[in-house]
Each structure stands twice: as structure tokens, then as C-alpha cells.
Image (cartoon, rainbow, N blue to C red):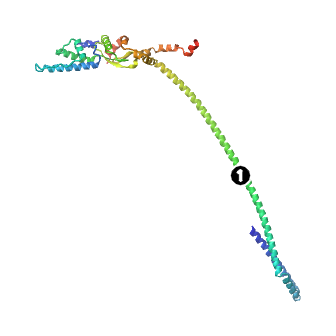
């Protein structure tokens, strides 16, 4: 940007100087054509005056002024450029800030929405799991009660079925060592007597 | 008892002879004695001889049947009798709750030989869980005459009494 401005200013200065010289030469050449030889004296005088006016000091003065003007223009342009740059930077910052904020807000809202959805899904899933667990618990409880009832019935049945053995075991444990076989002889013989016919029949008819 | 009538050497078993094992032991003893006496018959006269020692059971068997073991006929009769008993005598298996005493066994065998069969052989078993009574096993049948079986048969009566029993809470409530 600076290079282009500098080039444009230099081009402007060169063009104005060229135009000034061209006008001076035109004026001087036009006069000489009209007045031909008679005016040669004036021309020479004018040339001398020109030489007199545009002497080295004057030229140096012009050069200095041009340099100052040029520096001034450069400084102004630099200042404008700096202001413009600052403005642009500021606008760019503002724009970036707004864009980023908007983008972030958008992303945050999406993120929040997705979190809400996930939370909802998790709550639904937990609710379903809890319901399933509760259902399972109730089912298992009923099954357990049924099993306990069946086991109770089975145990009572077994107790009633083996009641004879239980009582016999109890009697044996309680008074088993007091039961003398000799005292049972009459009882045993009476039992054998009661089954005598069956025993004899089995012995005679059996293999 | 057809077998009994066919077992006619008119010999009898003493009540101390209880089981099949006793018969086997007596048979071996009888065979040894017969063998010894047969060998003695072919020996030279005047050679010293020593009779084999007989068991108490064998002595009882011989004396109960009035046999003379020096007589070959008696020996053969006894041998034939023992073989016949071994082959044909009815056998019973009786289990008790405890080991029976010899006196008990004698009384039992006395009864069985009189009531069931004169040559019946008994094998004694032990079943401590039957309590009192016995379990008799014949050829094809089992006669459970134990206290355990008696309790089983009278289970209904026991259940009836249990059903009529009051619980402690009911007893407290009535008092």
C-alpha cells in the first residue's frame, strides 16, 4: 500500500514538472514563431530571466519544498493508512468477535441440546431398567414364595411319610440301650407265629 | 412238610446247630473223621492211633441222634444226612437290632424247628435301626416284624394324635 502511494505521488510530481516545462517551452517557441527575428532579443532576455529565475538556489528551494511536500503527503498518507488499518483491525476484531461468539453460542446451544437429549435418554433408560428390575423382583418374589410353599409342603409330606422312622429313631436314641433282646423273645415269637403259615408256604412253594 | 418226610434217616439237628455255616463245619468234620477211620482200617493192628478232636457241636449232633461214629453205617448215615440238609434244608434270614445271646438263639431255634420246619437253618443278621423286633427273610418274602414297621403301620394313629395336640399359644389361650 505504501509503495503504491509513493509511486503515485512521484508520478504526479513528475507529470506536473513535465507539464510545467512543456508549457514554458511552448510559450517560448510560440513567441519566436510569431515575432521571428525581431523578437529574438526578447527571447534571449527571457531566457536570461528564466535562467535568472530558475537558478540553482531556486531549484534547490523547489527541491526542498517538493521534498517537504512529499514527506508531508507521505506522512499524511501513512497516518490515513494507519487510521484505516486501525479501523480495519478494529472492525475485523469486532467481526471476528461477533462471529466467534455467534458460532460458539450456536455450538453451545447444540451441545446443550445434545446433552439434554442424552440426559433424557439416560433418564428413560434408567426408568425402563428400574421398571424391569422391579418387575423381575416381583416375579422372583412370587416364585420364591411358591418355592418356599412347595418346599414346606414337601417337608411336611416327608415328615408325615417318615413319621414312623422318626419316632423309631427317637425311641432308639432315647431308650435303645435299655431294650433287651431277651425281653423281646415272646413278642418276636408271637409275630413269627402270626406269619407262620405264610413263611411255611413260602419255604415249601418257593424256589 | 414233604421235604421233612423225605429227609428220612430219622436224624435230627440239635438246636445249637443254627445256620448253613454250622452245617458246612459239621460236614468237614464228618469227612475228616470218616477219612481218618478209613485210613485206620487199613493200618497194621497195634499201631498207635489218635482220633481227631471233634467239636462240641459235632458231639451234640452225634449224641442227639444216638450214633456210633466207629460204625461205618452210622457215619454214612450222618454224611448223607448232612449232605441232604446242606442241599435241601429251608433257610431263613433273621435280623435283629442287637446281637442275640446263645440262650436267645436256642429258644428261637427250638421254636422254629418245632413250628416251621425241623431242619430249618437260620442266618442271623444285624440291623441296629429296626429298634425292637426282627426282620425275617424267607426264600421269596420279607416279613418285617420290627418296631419301625409297627410305627409305620400305625402312622395314622400317630398323625391323629399330633393333629389333636394343641400348640403352646393355644394352651396359654385356654388357660
Dot 1, crowdedness within 10 Å: few (<14), some or many (≥20)? few
- Could you tell me if residue A131 is visible in this image? yes
Task: Give me the chain letter of mark 1.
Answer: A
Q: Residue at x 82, y 79 (%)?
A: A59
Name the image quarter holding the C terminus of chain A. top left
**Does residue A173 appear left or right of residue A111 in this picture?**
left
In the rendered view, tell whether residue A174 sits above or below residue A79. above
Q: Residue at x 67, y 43 (%)?
A: A117
Residue at the disc numbered 1: A103
Name the image quarter holding the N terminus of chain A. bottom right
Whole-percent x, y for residue B74 in the image: 19, 14
**Does residue B18 appear left or right of residue B158 in this picture?**
left
Q: Nearer the viewer, residue A87 or B103?
A: B103
Q: Nearer the viewer, residue A129 or B4?
A: A129
Whole-percent x, y for residue B49 in the image: 15, 20
Disc 1 secondary structure class: helix
Q: Nearer the viewer, residue B105 or A198?
A: B105
Q: Residue at x 56, y 26 (%)?
A: A145
**Does residue A58 appear left or right of residue A147 in this picture?**
right
Q: Residue at x 46, y 15 (%)?
A: B155
Amino acid at each position: 500500500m505504501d509503495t503504491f502511494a509513493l509511486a503515485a505521488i512521484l508520478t504526479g510530481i513528475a507529470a506536473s514538472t513535465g507539464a510545467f516545462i512543456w508549457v514554458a517551452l511552448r510559450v517560448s517557441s510560440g513567441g519566436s514563431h510569431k515575432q521571428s527575428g525581431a523578437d529574438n532579443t526578447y527571447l534571449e532576455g527571457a531566457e536570461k530571466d528564466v535562467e535568472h529565475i530558475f537558478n540553482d538556489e531556486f531549484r534547490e528551494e523547489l527541491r526542498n519544498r517538493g521534498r517537504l511536500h512529499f514527506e508531508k503527503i507521505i506522512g499524511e498518507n501513512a497516518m490515513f493508512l494507519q487510521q484505516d488499518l486501525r479501523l480495519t483491525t478494529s472492525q475485523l476484531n469486532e467481526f471476528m468477535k461477533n462471529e466467534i461468539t455467534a458460532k460458539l453460542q450456536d455450538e453451545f446451544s447444540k451441545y446443550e441440546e445434545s446433552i439434554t437429549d442424552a440426559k433424557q435418554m439416560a433418564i428413560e433408560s434408567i426408568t425402563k431398567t428400574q421398571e424391569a428390575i422391579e418387575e423381575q423382583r416381583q416375579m422372583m418374589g412370587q416364585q420364591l414364595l411358591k418355592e418356599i410353599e412347595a418346599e414346606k409342603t414337601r417337608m411336611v409330606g416327608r415328615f408325615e411319610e417318615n413319621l414312623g422312622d422318626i419316632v423309631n429313631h427317637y425311641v432308639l436314641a432315647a431308650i435303645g440301650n435299655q431294650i433287651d433282646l431277651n425281653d423281646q423273645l415272646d413278642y418276636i415269637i408271637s409275630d413269627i407265629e402270626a406269619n407262620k403259615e405264610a413263611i411255611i408256604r413260602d419255604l415249601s412253594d418257593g424256589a | 412238610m414233604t421235604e421233612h418226610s423225605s429227609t428220612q434217616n430219622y436224624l435230627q439237628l440239635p438246636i445249637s446247630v443254627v445256620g448253613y455255616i454250622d452245617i458246612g463245619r459239621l460236614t468237614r468234620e464228618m469227612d475228616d473223621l470218616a477219612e481218618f477211620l478209613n485210613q485206620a482200617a487199613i493200618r497194621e493192628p497195634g499201631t498207635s492211633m489218635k482220633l481227631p478232636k471233634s467239636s462240641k457241636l459235632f458231639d451234640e449232633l452225634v449224641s442227639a441222634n444216638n450214633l456210633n461214629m466207629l460204625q461205618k453205617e452210622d457215619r454214612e448215615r450222618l454224611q448223607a444226612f448232612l449232605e441232604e440238609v446242606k442241599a435241601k434244608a429251608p433257610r431263613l434270614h433273621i435280623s435283629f437290632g442287637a446281637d442275640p445271646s446263645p440262650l436267645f438263639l436256642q429258644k428261637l431255634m427250638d421254636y422254629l424247628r418245632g413250628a416251621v420246619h425241623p431242619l430249618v437253618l437260620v442266618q442271623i443278621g444285624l440291623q441296629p435301626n429296626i429298634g425292637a423286633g426282627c426282620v425275617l427273610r424267607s426264600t421269596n418274602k420279607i416279613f418285617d416284624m420290627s418296631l419301625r414297621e409297627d410305627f409305620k403301620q400305625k402312622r395314622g394313629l400317630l398323625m391323629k394324635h399330633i393333629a389333636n395336640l394343641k400348640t403352646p399359644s393355644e394352651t396359654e389361650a385356654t388357660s
